[in-house]
Amino acid sequence: MLTAPLKIPMPLDKAGHKIDVTFDVPPPPKVSHSTGYFLGLRMLFAPADPDGKIATIDANPVFVRVTLHRLQDGKEIPVKIWNRVDVAKGYEPSRFESFSLKDDIAVSSRAFTEYSGAPPGTPDASTYVLEFGGPGEQGPGRYRLRLETLKDIPQLKGFKAFLSYERAPDR
């Protein structure tokens, strides 16, 4: 049985790629300021991004249909996935609100970048993280995640990416 955090290889260029995985979520760490788990993509890239991968995936977001269920007493109980959206207008400061996914469809959006400190151009040395949304803190247990890519995006062919389900960074 898999245990969160999950990191599952995922092609991004073709519609119809499906992931159906059952996994366990352990209890949260005793000291954490994390808001719970999030679902997203981890894309590998070279420091300084000489191939322009970040700009390419930002210009061609990944659309997925995704559901999450908690498995309890032989039943699958739906878990809402929330997406944080900046609702500020014009020159207002950022103001985020959470909305549940409409029709279980999520779109990738920039979350954060992890730089390895490797020299510029070192292949796959850093990670760009994009978020689809997250269920927040649901507690330990067994879950089933189903996901399907919805659009052909030929510009993303050959990108090394992984579906991730992991704790949000401490804030």
Image (cartoon, rainbow, N blue to C red):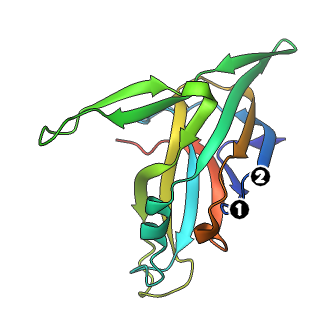
Please provide percent x and percent y for residue 92. Answer: 13, 37
Quadrant containing the C terminus in the rendered view: top left
Give SS at disc 2. loop
Amino acid type indicated by mark 2:
His
Residue denoted by label 1 = 11
Give SS at disc 1. loop
Seen in the image, is 130 located left or right of residue 69?
Answer: left
Residue denoted by label 2 = 17
* Residue at 43% from the left image edge and 36% from the top image edge: 34
* Cα distance in 3D space between marks 2 and 1: 7 Å
Please provide percent x and percent y for residue 66. Answer: 67, 35
* Residue at 67% from the left image edge and 58% from the top image edge: 152
Q: Earlier in the sequence, mark 2 or mark 1?
A: 1
Residue lying furthest left: 91
Decide which of 145, 143 is in the foreground and name it: 145
Question: Is residue 21 visible to us here?
Answer: yes
Q: Quadrant of residue 146?
A: top right
Decide which of 143, 133 is in the foreground and name it: 133
Seen in the image, is 131 located left or right of residue 146?
Answer: left
Quadrant containing the N terminus in the rendered view: top right
Query: Quick check: marks 2 and 1 in contact, CB under 8 Å?
Result: yes
Q: Badge 2, how many Cα within 10 Å: few under 14, some, many 20+?
A: some
Seen in the image, is 111 located left or right of residue 40?
Answer: left
Q: Badge 1, how many Cα within 10 Å: few under 14, some, many 20+?
A: some
